[in-house]
Image: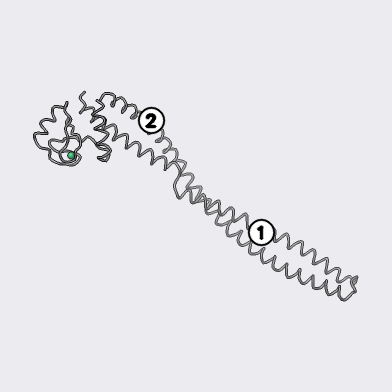
Amino acid sequence: MSDSNLLYRLQEIDTTWDRVRRRLQQLQTLAGGSNELKTTREEVASTESNLQQWQRAQSEAEFESRSLTTKIQESEERLMSGQVRNPKELEALQSSIESMRRHKISLDDQSVEAMLKVEEFSGALVKQKGSLATLESNWQTKHKAIEEELQQRKKEFLYLKRLREQTVGQISPAAVEQYEHLRRRKNGIAVAKLEGDICNACHMQVPTGIVGSARNTDVLLYCPGCGRLLHRE
Ligand SMILES: [Zn+2]
């Protein structure tokens, strides 16, 4: 096979290889999951953490309030018992009871606030977990398809790599160098097909003299419009 024909085959391999490479990159990004799924997972984690924080705050406030109730009761019993007679001591006891009552009111306020927050975050969590379950289940189906395609494309990628190596091995090094040089400069397309007398890369009409000599496939021909190698079947 002539260099001209082999270069065109190489171009076809490279074009397919580029397409497979782009798809592989796309699939690798897709395999990470959708942004919506990531955001919803983060939301659920954040709501769970908020919920736990408020549940802790609620039980702490309730525990403190209960132990304060016991302390207030004990102090009140002491006050009523008549055991304390010293006026200064009595006054101190009364003032301590009042201070404990004020503290208890504030603790009960905190407890109610925490309880409302617990309800709010529990409700939000139920909704978010529902959305997440739907997204995860859709993702499972999609993910399977993505993984299957990834495996298939990887095989194609390696097959094309081998095929390219074989093809390059049959072309003269000077022609391969020319091809690689054009591919870098011409947006990945080094060889254009001649359709009638039209270059299918730049759509320029190629002069008859050049078209005629394109029949002789031993000589490399260039499109005067875009500078690519011309191939005629
Ligand atoms: Zn051209």
Query: Residue 211 vs residue 14: left or right?
Result: left
Residue 220 occupies quadrant: top left
Task: Say which label, 1 or 2, has the lower sequence index.
Answer: 1
Amino acid type of the residue that numbered disc 1 sits on in the rendered structure = Ala
Amino acid type of the residue that numbered disc 2 sits on in the rendered structure = Lys
Query: Residue 126 vs residue 109: left or right?
Result: left
The C terminus appears in which quarter of the rendering?
top left
Residue closer to the observer: 101 or 29: 29
Residue closer to the observer: 171 or 159: 171
Label 2 sits on a secondary structure element that is: helix
Where is mark 1, residue-wise? 57
Residue lying farthest to the left in this orientation: 208
In the depicted structure, whether residue 127 falls above or below residue 227: below
Ligand 1 has an atom within 8 Å of the beta carbon of the residue at disc 1: no
Residue drawn at (34%, 36%) of the image: 20
Residue 141 occupies quadrant: top left
Image coords of residue 116 (percent x, y): 61, 62
Image coords of residue 122 (percent x, y): 58, 56
Where is mark 2, residue-wise? 155
Residue 52 occupies quadrant: bottom right
Label 1 sits on a secondary structure element that is: helix
In the depicted structure, whether residue 167 falls above or below residue 112: above
Pointer 1 local density, CA inside 10 Å: few below 14, some 14–19, many at least 20: some
Residue drawn at (34%, 29%) of the image: 161
In the depicted structure, whether residue 129 falls above or below residue 9: below
Residue closer to the observer: 9 or 185: 185
Image coords of residue 53 (percent x, y): 63, 56
Image coords of residue 92 (percent x, y): 83, 72
For residue 89, which numbered disc appears in the image?
A: none
Residue drawn at (44%, 38%) of the image: 144
Ligand 1 has an atom within 8 Å of the beta carbon of the residue at disc 2: no
